[in-house]
Amino acid sequence: MKKLCSFSLYLLLLAYWGCSKDTATGPGPITDNSVPNSQFSDIQKKVFTTTCALSNCHGDSGTQANLLLVEGKAYSNLVNVQSFLFPDFKRVLPDSSSKSLLIKILKGEISPRMPLNGNKLSDATIDSISKWIDNGALNN
């Protein structure tokens, strides 16, 4: 019986060591390269340019809600700018994502949710944009 208990303990320890995480040889963290980091330049590249600054949306032609989100113009059209459709809100209020119209519309708290007729942005993407705003909405 003593040998059986020792052998069982040995198997448990082996299983524990075999299943423990070894960060040196195990896989790295899973990253989604489509989620922008919390900098305006990355948000522009991965979200606005690919999802918003399109024809008849917020691109050069047929700009909706008087909001142009093309590279080089998006920042000045967002930060500390009163909304055309919702004048009680600033599009992006630095240091306050919870009071920024952009976040409310991306989350669907105010209609229409954006992107219009498209899939909702991932929570990770919206969180990254929120973090950029909460960190001062810098043009970085």
Image (tube, rainbow, N blue to C red):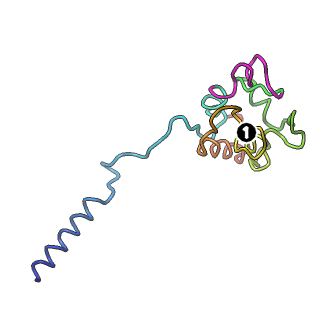
Q: Main secondary structure of the magenta part?
A: loop
Residues 107 and 98: in front is 107
For image coordinates 70% across by 45% down, the residue present is 107
Q: Is residue 132 left or right of residue 9?
A: right
Above or below 91: residue 54: above
Q: Residue furthest front?
A: 117
- Magenta segment: does it hold 62? yes
- Magenta segment: does it hold 28? no
Label 1 crowd (10 A; few <14 / some 14-19 / many >=20): some
Q: Could you say where residue 66 lies in the image, as x and y percent from the top left? A: 83, 26
Residues 88 and 28: in front is 88
The residue under label 1 is: 113
Above or below 140: residue 93: below
Residue type marked 1: Arg
The residue segment tinted magenta is: 50-65
Q: Could you say where residue 39 lies in the image, as x and y percent from the top left? A: 64, 38
For image coordinates 76% across by 50% down, the residue present is 98
